[in-house]
Amino acid sequence: MKPLGPVPAGFATIDGELAIGGRKASDLVAEAGRTPLFVYSRERIAARVAELRSALPQQVALNYAVKANPFAPVLQTMSGLVDGFDIASGGELTMVTAAGIDPARVSFAGPGKRDDELEAAISAGVTLNLESEGEAARALAIAARIGVTPRLAVRVNPDFDLKGSGMKMGGGAKPFGVDAERVPALVKHLLAAGADWRGFHIFAGSQALDAAAIAETQAQTLALAARLAAEAGAMPPKVNLGGGFGIPYFPGDEPLDLAAVGKALGAQLEQLPAGLANTAFCIELGRYLVGESGVYLTRVVDRKVSHGEVYIVTDGGLHHQLAASGNFGTVVRRNYPVAIASRFGAPVQEEASVVGCLCTPLDRLADKGGFPRAEVGDLVAVFCAGAYGASASPAMFLGQGPAAEMLV
């Protein structure tokens, strides 16, 4: 029997069922009218933001990385909770403006921005995090043509990465950002061109659970920002320190020691060099804000035994939960936190694999985990589904289509 990932703390049981936001899973499915269904908890999102505010130094602003979960009600909820929003496409710009978010609160990173995306962002007053000198030239030309002073920051490819991170975004050759040694010259060029230079965006990695590694990276980030500012001869108005805060997905994962991260960052900010004395700082987080707020509910449509192994077949699968299936950057497949929502907290009765409805052996949500006996009609819950689920999975694979989504 293979272990399952840890279910996030705080989920309750009502009448033997998983409860989300104080409501039974079956009631939520009935309201949605169908499965599969993503359910996001407004209360859990707000609690996580409050936890961050309490732990981080007061002068550090909090940005939401929209790519983690762009569901419109989530964006509207976030609008009243965080200070800024980070987007990665023109499509996400449309989403945030449709949610009523002021573009002045938005920054736009990502390689390969098209000219129409650059023009839309510049026109709206979004801060562009420039990924190359070529992108800078295109942005300045577009701004001159439309008669707008562009808000431009420089995304830096740092000389280091975030140790233990799931995805390394800095250090060595990368498609992201401008190599650190070339940044000062680009900043001088932007200032000479009359742009509204907004500072630096330095993102070294993501999904780290080691507080010491995050603290070390933040210290390196501050030192790099100070060095680049000195070499450019200009104080950055703002420095985006990136994020990288991870959440536990797999057996053996332990939650990030947030208090330790906040304490270390506070100490670092008390020793800022003169070149950063009036700089504003922010942390950019997506997964950490919303990941544990979400649950993916899928219904059991068949139960079968093959060569003595039990398979719980659901109407969901990797087309909505690519990461849980082990096909989203995982080298060695491990089980996400998965439970039988209809019998939440009931004792383990059998070893079973939870599989989806797609005709591929890759469509597996839990491999030989321990579960109470599940029958046709029961609901299965995949936890940690609030980030990189609905928007990061191939919903149209085999014509399946998207899952329903709900914020409670």
Image (spheres, rainbow, N blue to C red):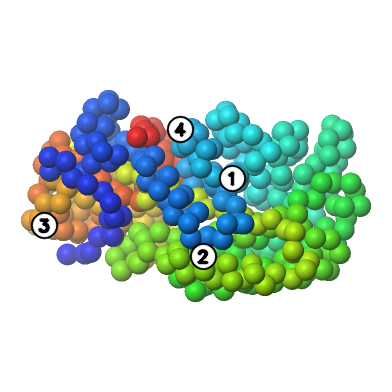
Q: Are marks 1 and 4 in contact (CB under 8 Å)?
A: no
Q: Residues within 10 Å of mark 1 (few under 14, many from 20)?
A: some
Q: Which residue is mark 1?
A: 83
The front one of 216 and 301 is 216
Which one is earlier in the sequence, the residue at label 3 or at label 2? Answer: 2
Q: Nearer the viewer, mark 1 or mark 4?
A: 1
- Would you place residue 33 above or below residue 211 in this image? above
Q: Position of residue 227 (x, y in %)?
A: 76, 71
For residue 46, side relative to residue 252 (left or right):
right
Residue type beneath disc 1: Asp
Numbered mark located on residue 150 in the image: none
Helix, strand or loop status at disc 4: helix
For the point 78% across and 68% down, which residue is it? Answer: 274
Looking at the rendered image, the disc whose residue lies closer to the viewer, 3 or 2, is 2
Tags 3 and 4 in contact by the CB under 8 Å rule? Answer: no
- Mark with earlier residue (3, 4): 4
Question: Mark 3 — residue?
Answer: 348
Q: CA distance from mark 3 to mark 4?
A: 36 Å
Instruction: Kindly state the secondary structure of the residue where label 1 is placed.
Output: loop
Task: Say whether disc 1 or disc 2 marks the residue closer to the N-terminus.
Answer: 1
Mark earlier in primary sequence (3, 1)? 1
Which image quadrant for residue 375? top left
Between 66 and 114, the one lying in front of the other is 66
Type of amino acid under label 2:
Gly
According to the image, label 4 marks what residue? 73
Q: Amino acid at mark 3?
A: Val
Query: Which residue bears the numbered disc 2?
Result: 262
